Each structure stands twice: as C-alpha cells, then as structure tokens.
Amino acid sequence: MAPRKNFNSITAKGVTKGVALVDFSAPWCGPCKAMAPVIKRLRHRYRGRVAVIKVNIDKDKKLAARFKIQTIPTLVVLDNGKEVKRFIGLQREATLAKSLDRALS
C-alpha cells in the first residue's frame, strides 16, 4: 500500500492521472480488520492500475476531516484526485471491483 506521505502526490488532481482506492480505517476497528483481506486482494488484482492507500484515521485526523469521514471503514474511489464513489461499512469484493473497473474505463 502506498505510504501516507505520498497521498497528496498520488491523489492530487492534475498531479497524477489514475485511479486510487483509499481505505480509511483504524487498527482497533473490527469491520476494518474484516475488510483487510478484500483490500489486499484488490491491491494485488489491480497492481499497476490502481493505487491502494490505507489511511489510519487516528494518525491522519486532518485527512479524515478533509474527506469528512464519520464511519469506518470508509472506502473512497478517486479518479485523477476527484472522488467518484464512496462506500461505508463492509463491502463485497465484487462491488468494489465493479466501481474500480468503472473508474478505469
């Protein structure tokens, strides 16, 4: 997963072209832990085409506030730095893959 310090360079509009999946979570969150294997499979499946970024909301409070994160896990799909889809709570891998495929097309 991309390190937090590269978040802006990866997602900033006009800086990087492409699709990103941002996983807002916390280590103490049970549903976030349940999503981890799904995120890992998606990272592998979309390697080289989608940046997968994990954001710990406890450590990156400003970033969580910027995206108005109120519930975790929250997964945000960005296309060229612009939010195109948001998922709150546990999600099926197929649902996330469908959204990533749309963003890539």
Image: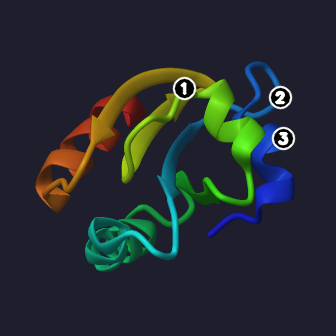
Left or right for 8, reference 28 = right
At 35% from the left and 31% from the top, the residue drawn is 86
At 60% from the left and 36% from the top, the residue drawn is 18
The image position of residue 9, as x and y in percent, is 84, 41
Closer to us: 75 or 29: 29
Which residue lies under the disc numbered 2?
Answer: 15
Secondary element type, mark 2 = loop
Residue density around tag 3, few if under 14, some if 14–19, many if 20 or more, within 10 Å: few
Numbered label attached to residue 9:
3
Q: In this view, does 88 lie above or below 68?
A: below
Which of pointers 3 and 1 lies earlier in the amino acid sequence?
A: 3
Residue density around tag 1, few if under 14, some if 14–19, many if 20 or more, within 10 Å: few
Which residue lies under the disc numbered 1?
Answer: 68
Q: What residue type is labelled 1?
A: Lys
The image position of residue 105, as x and y in percent, is 35, 29
At 50% from the left and 35% from the top, the residue drawn is 69
Residue density around tag 2, few if under 14, some if 14–19, many if 20 or more, within 10 Å: few
> CB under 8 Å between callouts 3 and 2?
yes
Q: Residue 88's image quarter?
A: top left
As measured in the structure, the alpha-carbon distance from the residue carrying label 3 to the one carrying label 1 is 20 Å
Q: Residue 98's image quarter?
A: top left
Closer to us: 100 or 37: 37
Secondary element type, mark 3 = helix
> CB under 8 Å between callouts 3 and 1?
no
Left or right for 88, reference 79 = left
Q: What residue type is labelled 2?
A: Val
As measured in the structure, the alpha-carbon distance from the residue carrying label 1 to the one carrying label 2 is 22 Å
Closer to us: 48 or 67: 67
Q: Is residue 100 above or below residue 44?
A: above
Secondary element type, mark 1 = loop
